[in-house]
Structures are given as C-alpha cells and as structure tokens.
Image: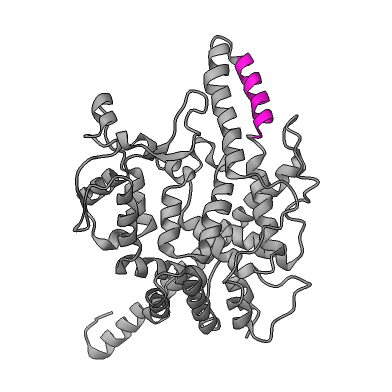
Amino acid sequence: MSLKFYRRVAFGLSPNDKQDKDPLNWALSQLSSIPDLLWPGTIPTEKELRKKYGEWVYGDREVLRKKFKNDKHAYKKAKDELRIKTGERYFELNEHAIRHYQTRHSTQPVFERFWLFWGNHFAISEKDFLAEFSTGPYQREIIRPNMVKTFEEMVLSVTTSWCMIHHLDNSESFGPNSKKGMEWRETINENHARELLELHTVSPNAGYTQEDVIQLAYIMTGWSHKWSRKNLETGDVWFDQEMHQKGDKIVLGVKYKNDAKRELAKVIHDLATHPICIKFISTKLCRHFITDEPTQEMISPVIEAWNRSNGSLTEIHKAVITQAYKYNETTHKFHPPEIWLMQLSRMFDLSIPLSAEKMHYAFKSKPTSKQRKKFRSSVFVRNIYTEVLNILQADVMQKLKNKRKSKEKKYLDDAKILGLSSN
C-alpha cells in the first residue's frame, strides 16, 4: 500500500508518524469517537461569539450610525475602534488557527477529514459577518458532535442552528396565514427550504417542484432568532408560533398534518432517509475521498452501509474509507486548496498556524501582521492550486485535441482505402 492512502483519507504522514502495518484498520479505528480539540489558545463558544457579534452590530447600527450620521470620518474612526473592541478582524483568523492546528496534530486525522467534508456540505456564506463570528463555532459545536450520530440527527441540528437560520434568512420567513404574517403583511422566504432540498438532502434528482419548496418553507416558518431591542437578531433560536403557517402541508407527495414545531422533524426524517438523498450523499462522499467520477460499484457499498445502519455516520464513514482503500491504487484525486495546505503543513512540519502565544489577542489593537500571515498563506496556496488546475486543464484539452486529430486522420486514411475520398 502506497503512502497515497494517507493523503487520500487524511493529511499524509508527518516526519514523526510511522506507516501502519494495517493502513485500513488505522483509518477505520479513528471514526467511532470525537477527538478533543487540541488548540491550546482561546476557543470561544458559540454563545460567547454571538454576544461579541451582538456588540458589533448593535454598536454600529444603533449607536455609531446615529451618533456620527453627519460626520463620515468620525464614524469610520469609531467603527474601526469598535472592530478592535469586538474582535471583528480577529476571530476568523483564530478559527483558522484552531482548525489547522487540529488537522496538523490530531491523532485521528481521518475523523478530521470528514469534519472538513461535512463543514463544506453544510456550508455557510460570508454574509453578515458569519465568517468572523459564527462559522467556526457552528462547525465545532453543531457539525462535530453529530458526526457519531445519524445523518438525520445532523440535518436537524444544522437546520435549526442559529448560524444556518441566519445564513438562509429563516427569521424573515412568515406564514401568510400566521398571526404575524397577517398583521404585518409578510410572507415566506424560500431560501432555507430550497437549500434543505437542493443541497443538504435529496438534491434536484428527487424531482421536487416549486410547490414542494413553498410547502417546505411553510413547515419551516416559526424557526427564528428571538429578536430584542438589546440583542437585535443575535438572540437564541426559538419556535415562534405566531409566525408559523397553519394547516396541513404536502412535500414530495407526503402530507404533514398541522403540528407546529414538530412538523420540521417529521419532514427531515423523510428527506434524510429518502433513497435519492442516500444515493446523493453517498456519491458526494465517494467523489470527495475516491475520485471525481465514482462508479456505481464504488458507491453501492456506502449505500448498503447507510441502509443497514439506519444512517449511522460512523458506519457510513467506515464504508467510504473501505472503498477508498480498495480503489487507492487505481484512481486519482486532486484535493481542494485548504486540504492541500493542511497536508503540506503536516507532512513538512510547517509553522502553520502560529503558536497560541502569538495568536493571543488583547482587544486593544488590530491583529498583528504575523497573525494575518497564515490567512495570506492560505490565499497564496489557493492561487498556486488555481494555476496548477489551469495547467492541467490546458494539458487535458491538448490531449483531447490531439486525440481528435488522430481520429480524423484515421477516418481519412480509411476513406482513401475504401475510395470514398478524392483527397
């Protein structure tokens, strides 16, 4: 077994790591438990960072904009000071450090690779400072603990998390016949429902319609942030009955009776256990760990493990790793930029990220250039990665062009032999 397997399912071997006599068992043994986070520096909780975010948005929106509405320069200066006080320019850097330190030093690097996969599958945008204050703890406190549970449990936790609800604007979704919907003349926002169908569970392969999206959005109404004048949109997630659409709903031909907050868990159960969802996610896992175009032969054992275990992510992960091991020598996989950087860091013992001492932040000045250095390194590697992709693409296109010319020449030669061409 070549060393390629250690990069395919993890981050390669460091100078201090030894090649295991049984690489498959080495990988499988890492998937049944959640490793502790190793970063020795600050690891803020989701609530702590949400409080900081609240200080940032309230301070900017409700205080500074009003205080300096006629003085743009004073407003900019005061806002920069608020950035420093709330860590607006720091926490994303710190999350990169936590994440990269974990992949470099973890004794369960295969688990960490799946952590990155699920964080990408249930991705969060950069809108409204989510990257600065929310995405890191969301991946640590929502994604990570659910990786030893079922896929259904993970979907439910993700869907009702503060970060995902804010990312997809579900607090702005009102049932048209709900109390608040009628009083305020508001209606649904389809973002969360559409993404739950399209990207998180069944995919467009399920053949859902616009009406399915609307009906699912009705089911999801009420799941929102608890708004207040002090906290604005940074309050805890709750179910607001006065926003929820009344009546029965039908999604993908299944009727869900009017049952308030319990409707969401029921529809997620059906989506997460749907055969098309199982095939969609299984294929995506094989694509990530085996090859860009996985065959049905590669995917089928993952689907079987899923059905046999009722969606246990531990068993699903083990099936994926077993298939990656089986096809290690006959397939190729080009890794995403961040994973590539993490592999370089682990294999060559690079100083990425900085030490916890150098990442310490006192909330009195901007993050230092050294603290920002790792983020710039990520950008640098991403640029290299893009250039390599361009070179590979050009090489593939040239090979296809040469192959086409070769076929054309063969056709002309055959035509001459048969007397079909005068040239």
Quadrant including the C terminus: bottom left
Number of callouts in the render? 0
Q: Quadrant of the rendered structure where residue 113 is?
A: bottom right
Q: Quadrant of the N terminus?
A: bottom right
For this rendering, which residue is in front, 225 or 204?
225
Q: Is residue 77 magenta?
A: yes
Magenta stretch? 73-87
Residue 263 in sight? yes
Note whether 208 is above or below 46 in the view shown: below
Magenta stretch secondary structure, dominant = helix
> What residue do we see at 75% from left, 74% from top?
17
Q: Residue 265 in the image: x percent, y percent?
A: 35, 54
Residue 6 picture location, percent across and down = 63, 75
Q: Residue at x 32, y 37 (%)?
A: 241
The residue located at (65%, 36%) in the rendering is 89
334 and 47: which one is in front?
A: 47
Q: Is residue 316 magenta?
A: no
Q: Is residue 15 above or below residue 271?
A: below
Q: Residue sitting at 42 percent across and 72 percent down?
A: 293
Q: Quadrant of residue 110?
A: bottom right
Query: Is residue 386 found left or right of 253 in the rendered image?
Result: right
Front residue of this view, candidates 378 and 52:
52
**Left or right placement of residue 314 versus residue 220 in this view:** right
